[in-house]
Amino acid sequence: MRTAHGVWATVAVVTAGGIGLWTLLLVPLQVKPGKGFRILGYSAAGALLGQVVLGLLTYQQGYRPESNTHVLIGFIIFGVLLAAAWLQVHLTKHPAVWGLTLLMLAGLGVVAMRYVSA
């Protein structure tokens, strides 16, 4: 479980960061994102949520990070995803906000990876 949590961290951060950047590149071009954008955006959110679940399962098995900051960041990511789900209608109308949210979550994921013992 610990290995899956470590590997999935990279997948979740790269997915969220890549889709966040793609979204912000579409905004100046005034391209309206379609169904593919929503699918990829939800995939990035799902990858991050999967990472949080894997982290909780790893924690439950007795593996503890070096710093509690890692766990705190996991809860912050979960809270932001919960707020994004609640504001889903607003985020689909403003793709730049969704892109910034994904970039922020990717940045939080990078910071969380820093607070893990090797």
Image (spheres, helix red, strand yellow):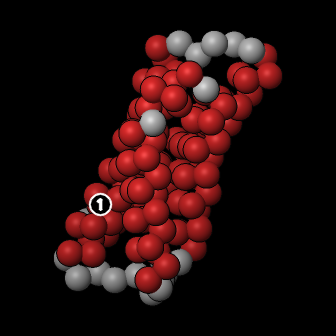
Q: Quadrant of the N terminus?
A: bottom left
Q: Position of residue 14 (x, y in %)?
A: 56, 46
Task: Judge from the rendering whether residue 94 lies leftward or rightward of residue 71; answer left or right.
Answer: right
Q: Residue at x 45, y 26 (%)?
A: 89
Quarter of the figure with residue 61: bottom left
Q: Nearer the viewer, residue 12 or 75?
A: 75
Q: Position of residue 53 (x, y in %)?
A: 28, 58
Quick check: 118 above or below 99? Answer: below
Residue 49, can we see it?
yes
Quick check: 106 above or below 97? Answer: below
Quick check: 45 above or below 41? Answer: below
Q: Residue at x 53, y 31 (%)?
A: 91
Q: Position of residue 63 (x, y in %)?
A: 29, 81
Q: Nearer the viewer, residue 79 or 44?
A: 79
**What residue would you read off at disc 1?**
54
Element type at mark 1: helix
Q: Residue at x 49, y 17 (%)?
A: 36
Q: Amino acid at mark 1?
A: Leu
Q: Residue furthest right?
A: 28
